[in-house]
Image (cartoon, grey):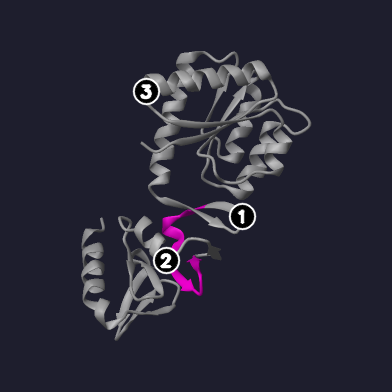
Amino acid sequence: METIRIAVVDDDSISCQRMVDYLQRYEQEKKERFTVSVFEKGKEFADNYSPIYDIILLDIQMKPMDGVEVARCVRARDDSVVIVFITSAPQYAINGYEVGALSYLLKPLPWFAFSQELERSIAQVRGRVERSILVNEGTKARRVPLNDIVFVESVRHSSVMHTLSDRLTVTATLKGLEAQLADHDFFRSNSCYLVNLAHVVGMESQDCIMSTGERLRVSRPRKKAFMTALTDYVGGRP
């Protein structure tokens, strides 16, 4: 079972410890695996944030930067991490909707409410992870939705991921990405391109036409298998 990465961000050491204890209890009772990181300074967490976490348990009432501001900084770099606010003042939790928080929990945290919310968060994470890939762009990690990837190109000793809005140079090899994406309707059209079949809108001679208008060469030895994969994909779409 894949490890869930959780950040606990709370300037109250007692509250932090309670959450860590609850997470350990949940691991034992539900047979889950967590990697837990604790941060007692919200601003420091926000300033150095990297999108490597699956769930953030975030206190709202912190200084000098409160939890809502921390969440805004997080969302600027990561639009998919699950955020759960922790607060002793429910009137502040309404602001969570601005930053896409899943929900909020009231202090002092009761075990049952915490475990129920954690279960819901994990379910959301598992659904999201299946539809995204975590890649390293230089020294930074970034989660990319699979639907946004048009194709991946091998350039010298690196891979360039062409998305709907950007081009990311990632440290993974094309062969490694092909293995990671094997069950997600990506197909190696030639030695240079790994194509997302969801973005193929047509074929013309030896080229596949992508939704972005780009033409990618399909090698002759791979064309039959490529067309079979594309036909299976189109036939299997709802």
Label 3: element kind: helix
The amino acid on which the numbered mark 3 sits, given as a three-letter code, is Lys
| 2 in relation to 62, above or below | below
Give residue 171's position: percent from left, percent from top. Answer: 52, 61
Screen quadrant of the C terminus: bottom left
Distance from Cα at disc 3 to Cα at disc 1: 34 Å
Residue at 25% x, 80% y: name it.
Answer: 221
Q: Name the residue under label 3.
A: 30
Q: Nearer the viewer, mark 3 or mark 1?
A: 1
Numbered badge on residue 174: 2
Position of residue 62 measured from the top left corner of the image (x, y, whole percent): 72, 27
Horizontally, residue 2 falls left or right of residue 60, namely: left
Among numbered discs 3 and 1, the one appearing first in the sequence: 3
Q: Does the magenta stretch include residue 156?
A: yes
Magenta segment boundaries in residue numbering: 143-163
For marks 3 and 2, the one nearer the N-term is 3
Residue 128: x %, y % from top left: 42, 44
In-image side of 143 versus 16 (left or right):
left
x, y (%) of residue 32? 39, 28
Residue identifier under label 1? 139
Binning the other alpha carbons within 10 Å of mark 1 as few (below 14), some (14 to 19) or many (20 upward) gives: few
